[in-house]
Amino acid sequence: MTNPLHPFDAPDLQPLRNSFEYDQLEAEMKDAFMAVFNKYIRPAERQANLIGMPHLGDSDLIERTLKDYGLSIVKRDATRTAFLLKAARARNPRRGMIFLRQYLQSVWPGVWKVEPLWHPIATADVYPEQRSARTRIDITPAVQAVYDASSEDGLPLVYRTDWQGRMQLYTKPRTNLFLNSTADTGSAGKGKWALGGNATRIGNVVGPDASNNAVAYSCQALGGCYVTHTLSLTQGKTYTFSVWARIGSGTPNAGKLLNVNNTYSLNVVGSGLSSQWQRFSMTFTATAAGSYGAAVPIYLATDYGVGTGIQLFGAQIENDGVVTSLIPTTTAPVTATDYTMNADGMATFADGVTPKTPLTYFRTGRIRVTLPVSSDNGLGLIEIAKAFRSVLAARLMIELQLSTIFENIGAETHGLAIAGAAKGVMPFMAIGTLKK
């Protein structure tokens, strides 16, 4: 790419240099004048010449102009400072987080973090004690609330990690229509699972939850080796069908792992199943006229190789197109609500183990800025805080956090208060100059 900018030399007193010299004395006087002018007058002339476009000037002109804008300077190279000047002139007086990010990038490129701070609505009476960056809240080691950083008032997505993996929890009721979802076929009449043609039960196998038995059977011939189930589905509705499956023995041929009424199926080739439990699912809409009623056949694992041992567990049929965590059922469909929230945003979880937790937050007027200790290049904590004060809108308060490996140290117990609505946080209590 061609650079359209061409460098040029600074102005020179060439006309004077080319003028007539009467004698040696006049020549020496011209040389003396030009030397004095270039050394003592030229720098001021350059600044005066560029006063209307100071970002093109030297560091002194740029910094003096920034100070005129009320912006404290943390000295870096002239290129970054010139960028900061252009940003200040373009956005003044609209100063806030946008300008703060530009300031940080120009002074500490690539090592800063800016986080708006939020506070739970349910505990507003203790504000600001429970403020946080509200990106992720670990409710328990297994349950987390994850917030969208770009959302101003959105609720989080709540996840639980267990034997099923990381599954989202919902405030909307969920229903498993599949009966006896974690029951073995057992003897005749136990549950609603039934062995189809060419299938032989091969004993009890513990399912992936390490508690309930899975359906275990062996294929004796091709062309209909399956377990089956009947269910009433509503035409026009969308359902999601899922099941855990694995190979107990043998090598399966291509087959249909899930099959609804011979109309909707999920084909899983031999390599699709392994000796490890996996969850398979498909979404379908019951649209075929006359195909749905009180006895819709549900086939699990049909047409696999002779001698292949198939193990199935936790079948689930639910409305809509989302695969959710397993809802165990027996002889009737079961509806579950993972958690509920009251008007103050306090969540109550149905498992009886996860504690009540505030999930709805309001955005405060505080911002936390995090910098590594090594990024300050010897600047004192108070000097850094002074530099930030002038780049923020009056309604904002800054919490400056200089961290090493102690990223989440609490401002309440290890803070250093600074005048002008700023607070410095360090992994140790100290006042003075920070050094590497």
Image: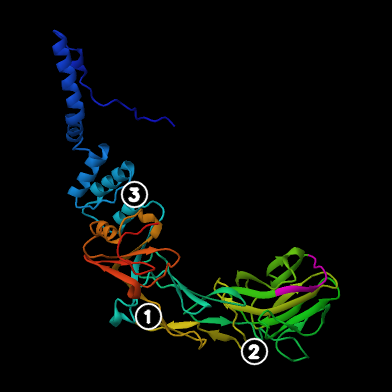
Q: Amino acid at mark 1?
A: Gly
Q: Quadrant of the N terminus?
A: top left
Q: Nearer the viewer, mark 1 or mark 3?
A: 3
Residue hosting label 2: 330
Q: Nearer the viewer, mark 3 or mark 2?
A: 3
| Residue 407 visible to an observer of this rendering | yes
The picture places residue 407, in percent across and down from the top left corner, at 42, 67
Disc 2 is placed on an element classified as loop
For mark 2, does the 10 Å Cα neighbourhood hold few (<14), some (14 to 19), or many (20 or more) residues?
A: some
How many numbered circles are shown? 3
- Left or right: residue 417 versus residue 182 is left
Name the disc covering residue 106, or none: 3
- Left or right: residue 240 versus residue 357 is right
The picture places residue 205, in percent across and down from the top left corner, at 75, 82
| Residue 237 visible to an observer of this rendering | no
Disc 1 is placed on an element classified as loop
- Which quadrant of the figure has residue 20? top left
Q: Amino acid at mark 2?
A: Thr
Residue hosting label 1: 345
| Mark found first going from the N terminus, 1 or 2 | 2
Q: Quadrant of the C terminus?
A: bottom left
